[in-house]
Image (spheres, rainbow, N blue to C red):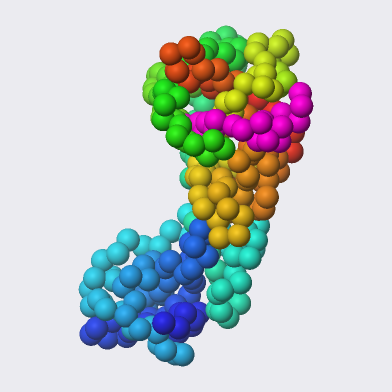
Amino acid sequence: MLQPKLKSKVRCTDLDIGEVTKVVLDPLSHEISHIVVSMNGSGERQVAMGHVQAVTDDFVQLRAPSTDILALPPFRREDYVTTHEVEISHLEDNIHVTPGEVLVPLPELEKNVKRRAFFMNFTHVIGFLIGLPIAYPIVRFLMKPMYASFDNEWLNVGNVSKIKHDDVGVQFKYKKKVKEAYMPEYEVEKNVWVLRATSELLEKVYKDKDMDFHDAKGKTIWTNKKTIPYVAFSGKCPHLGCAFKWRQHKTLGQVFLCPCHLSIYDAAGKVLDGPAPRALDALPVRVSAGGDVEIIDMEFKAGTKSQIRIV
Ligand code: FES
């Protein structure tokens, strides 16, 4: 099927409903996943390519009646960025649309930034209402968890028997209790990637040096020995914090692939492609005599070249 073009007329099974104003790309497959249709004065709707029956040079024929398309939720431009705003290598190579708005979904983490900004403003308003004389101790009390030192507890994330092959990323999920500022404690699901590493992989990860991890004061709390054949990586991509996967790449073999902006890392965590500013974040890891895999859950600032611990 031809690719839908910007400005093409869009035709439902019963009538013409408008024209294509934007296309949305799936950052993983590099294919068009949706078209955005301006509905002749009724706003814009995002229509999945599954609804498209045929594409000609001037028309996009949908297999649904106009009432079905009108019933779709209005298109939310703020959930997307243009392909010029993100660096995803070769993203538009296969896309032959006239220059215009070609969008990719905004990663979840960036959406959360807006939510965090909202909470920060909310805190400011409360502080103002309480009044300056008493605001400081109250705000200080409310914000106390933010000043707490890092949590360096060991967490059991599963059994090593889950790992069947060397140098292959295996995801371990775990739950962690989180306390943020004045919010009640809640539980989040997190994950790490653990590999049983051959000596070649250990060499790439550790470069012949043991790896130290530090507490908030810079004191060494654990050392991953360069000869212990287990490596754990934080489940967050160092670019903007998206979750990544272990995938087969057509030319690079098995890699860690982040779908948000297509950063690619080898099994040692080294960046092979994409906008990631640093390698995957290795975590303290140990395996008990009974095969329990334990990690210290650490988080590092996203988007920075050097590793800055934040949790
Ligand atoms: Fe951007 Fe992973 S968050 S590449």
User: In the shown orientation, is residue 204 left or right of residue 28?
Assistant: right
Answer whether residue 201 is magenta in the image.
yes
Q: Residue at x 68, y 50 (%)?
A: 272
Q: Which residues are magenta?
A: 191-209
For the C terminus, give its image quadrant: top right
Where is residue 167, by image quadrant? top right
Residue 61 x %, y %: 33, 83
User: In the shown orientation, is residue 243 left or right of residue 9?
Assistant: right
Toward the viewer: 162 or 16? Answer: 162
Toward the viewer: 126 or 85? Answer: 85
Question: Would residue 130 be visible to someone looking at this image?
Answer: no
The residue positioned farthest toward the right in the image shown: 208
User: In the shown orientation, is residue 14 left or right of residue 87?
Assistant: left
Residue 172 x %, y %: 44, 30
Question: Would residue 21 be visible to someone looking at this image?
Answer: yes
Q: Residue at x 69, y 23 (%)?
A: 226
Answer whether residue 205 is magenta in the image.
yes
For the N terminus, give its image quadrant: bottom left
Decide: is 145 above or below 118. above
Decide: is 204 above or below 276. above
Q: Residue at x 50, y 45 (%)?
A: 245
Q: Residue at x 40, y 74 (%)?
A: 37
Toward the viewer: 207 or 45? Answer: 207
